[in-house]
Image (tube, rainbow, N blue to C red):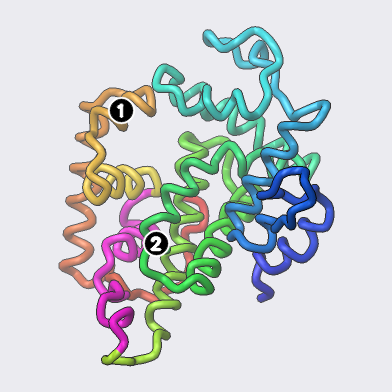
Amino acid sequence: MENWWRRFRSTTARGFVMCSTANAHGHGHRSVFEEGNALDAAEATFDLLMQGPAPLSLDGRQFGRGLPARECTLLEWRDLLLARETGVEVRDAVWAELVRRSRKHGASWTIGCVGIALPGLKRVAAPLTRDLQLASADDVVSDLLTAFLSGLQTINLDQHSIAPRLLWLAKRAAVRARRTETATLPIAPDDPACRTREPARGHEDFVLADAVAQRVVTAEEAELIGRTRLEKVPVSQVAVERGESARRLYRLREQAEQRLVAAIRAGKVTANSGGPERNQDR
C-alpha cells in the first residue's frame, strides 16, 4: 500500500501556502511539508485553516452543559476538550459531531479532527519514534495518522470514549510499524546506534496492542494502563482529565490487569503476535 505520508506530501502541499522560516526580505524558505513528518504537515494545515477568513467552528449551544453559548473555532474546541472541567459525556458529544462532519464534508473537517487530536497523537508518537532513524520514524508516524484517519470512518459513535478509541487505533498501527522497523534493522555490532537501539521484543506497548487485538482488554483499558503504568501519570490526574472518579478508574485498571496477566501467562498475549486484526473498533 502506498505510504500515506508520501501521498499527503505530494498532493496536499501543493494546495496550501508554504510555511516559511524566513522573513520577507527575500531569504529562501523551506516548507514543513518538505521537511516535517505527517503530523507536522497536518499541524501546519490545521493552523492555516484556523487563520482563514472563516475558520471551522461549532456552536457550543448545541451541546449545552456549561459550554460557551456561541460559535467556537476548532482551536478553541481543542482547548475546551483538553480542559479538566470538561466531562467525558461532553467530550463524546463534541467528538461525535466532529466525526460526523468529517464523514459528511471530508477534507477540511477531517484535518480539523486531526488538529484537535494533535496533542494526543504527538503523545502517542513520541515514545514510539524515539531512537529511530528519520525515515523509519516518518513511516511510524505515517501509519499512526493513517490509522487515525481510517478510524474516523469506522469508529462506532454510539460507544463512549470516542477520542481514546481513535487514539488507540492510531497507537496500535504505530506500534506495529515500529515493530516492523526495528525488526528489519541491519545487524551492525560496530554501530553504536544499533547497540543502543531499543529492541522490538518485549515492548510493553506491543503487549497492550496485542491484548486489545485479542479482545483481552478494551482500548479504554489499554489506554488507562499505558498512561498510568508506563507513562507514570497519576490515576487521579487521568480521572480529572476524563471527568470520572478515580475509584472507578482504579477498579477498571485492576480488573483489566488481572485479565492481561492471565492472558500473558496462558500465552494468548505476547509482544510479538502477528495475529489478525480482529478488533478494529474497541
Q: Position of residue 75 (x, y in %)?
A: 62, 29
Chain-order first, disc 1 or disc 2: 2
Name which quarter of the figure residue 114 lies in: top right
Left or right for 132, reference 231 = right
Q: Which segment is the magenta one?
A: 191-218
Name which quarter of the figure residue 271 lies in: bottom left
Which element is circle 1 on?
helix
Compared to 282, does 267 lie above or below?
below
Residue type (three-letter) at the residue carrying disc 2: Leu
Please report the residue visible at 65 percent of the width from the left and 49 percent of the height from the top: 42
Callout 1–callout 2 Cβ contact below 8 Å: no
The N terminus lies in which quarter of the figure? bottom right
Question: Crowding at label 2, few (<14), some or many (≥20) Cα neighbours within 10 Å?
Answer: many
Q: Which residue is mark 1?
A: 239
Compared to 187, does 44 lie above or below?
above
Q: Which residue is mark 2?
A: 128
Residue type (three-letter) at the residue carrying disc 1: Ala
Left or right for 85, reference 78 = left
| 205 within the magenta span | yes
Q: CA distance from mark 1 to mark 2?
A: 25 Å
